[in-house]
Amino acid sequence: MMRRPRFFYLLRTQYENLGDRIINRECLALLRGYGTVRVNVVGVPQDFVAGLSLSPGEACAAGGTFYRELFAARRAGEVVYLVLVPGAVMGAAQFVRQTVLVVGYAALKALGVRIIRIGASLGPFTPLRLQMERWKARMMAFIGLRDRRSLDYAREHGFPNAAPFRDFAFMLPTQLRRTGAEGGPLVLSFRAEDSDELDAIAVSISRFLARIDPEATRPLTIASQVERDRLTGRALAARVAGGRPVGYLDAADGEPALFDGYAGSAGVLSNRLHVLMFALSVGAPVRGLVHPTRNRKIIGLFEDAGLGDRLVKITDPDAVDAVPWPDRPADPAIFSTERRALVEAFETMVAR
């Protein structure tokens, strides 16, 4: 009888990001159903580890122990995976670090370790980083990309072993819209990289509010799942609130408070992928207010999942004016369809 695979999980992500904590937790839950899990938590904040719902014995707090166990399992003839975290992979070279990773991946591949990344977005990269990512990809057994645009980018630049793989937020349980939520606050959650982007977002939201709430009575909630988004949220509130009451929710309030805020809202407007995904899971109407180039991963993922009608380009005033109000939730069956596709892709990979 074949022994179950061993999944060694290299936990390196944005620890202040609630969305990253949740998709890592859902990824680990999937792995646990197919094999044993060992998670390298060296340098990971305790509150982040606590939010992963690890089983006893899964956390490894010593890097040396983590790799000794990995090598021992491989020497014993076990099927061993090194799992890289889901999420966005992009940016500049970090030459020394990336060189070390290329060499390390090559050594692991030579030992028969299967290096995989699942539930990721890819690119864009600077030219040097792109070359290094291509070298790393050649050492990997599977690269599961969560949106068509990332998959196109990978294939265009010669990444082997790239295939579709849904976002882990689709593994969340779903619920129908809460009774009476239509009268709740409108939730806004945004990131702006510069003043021009903040201006464009503020213009779109102000235009929307002027149409659906001309008397400025509807409460607003500013939600931030990442600490760095708080400043954008407060700057946006100052620009668009008018006389409306404004409340605030952020990651420090905890996961239940954020999900409850989305569930009790009249709707959620955001350019943050996992804000939109989590709000969808609790039955809230969502609209992604997106920039055509800056929000590529949201556009690709939503279009792939049949949620393209939920996207509104902030560069198109007519699109903002066409957003229906009162809004309706998306079909919750989308989650079960996407979840099934994710599990099937994973099972196909482990069966190789």
Image: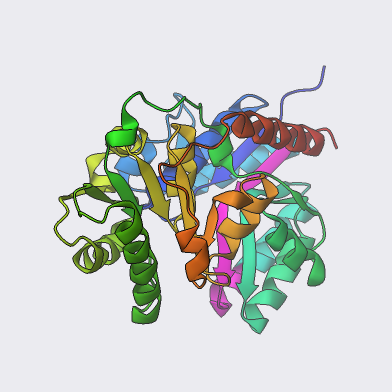
Closer to us: 12 or 252? 252
Residue at horizontal 70%, vertical 62%?
Answer: 149
Residue 41 appears in the picture as rendered: no
Is residue 89 visible in the rendered structure shown here? yes
Residue 210 located left or right of residue 329: left
The correct choice, above or below, for 298 with respect to 283 in the image is below
Q: Is residue 202 left or right of residue 21?
A: left
Task: Write down the region rendered in magenta.
Answer: 80-100
Asked if residue 256 lies in the magenta stretch, the reply is: no
Up/down of 34 relative to 88, above or below = above
The quadrant where residue 9 appears: top right
Q: Quadrant of residue 151?
A: bottom right
From the top left corner, tell me how far across and down residue 186 is, in percent: 31, 47
Residue with the most extreme right position? 352
Left or right, residue 85 beside residue 61: right
Residue 91 falls inside the magenta stretch: yes
In the image, residue 140 lies at what x, y percent? 75, 55
The colour scheme is: rainbow
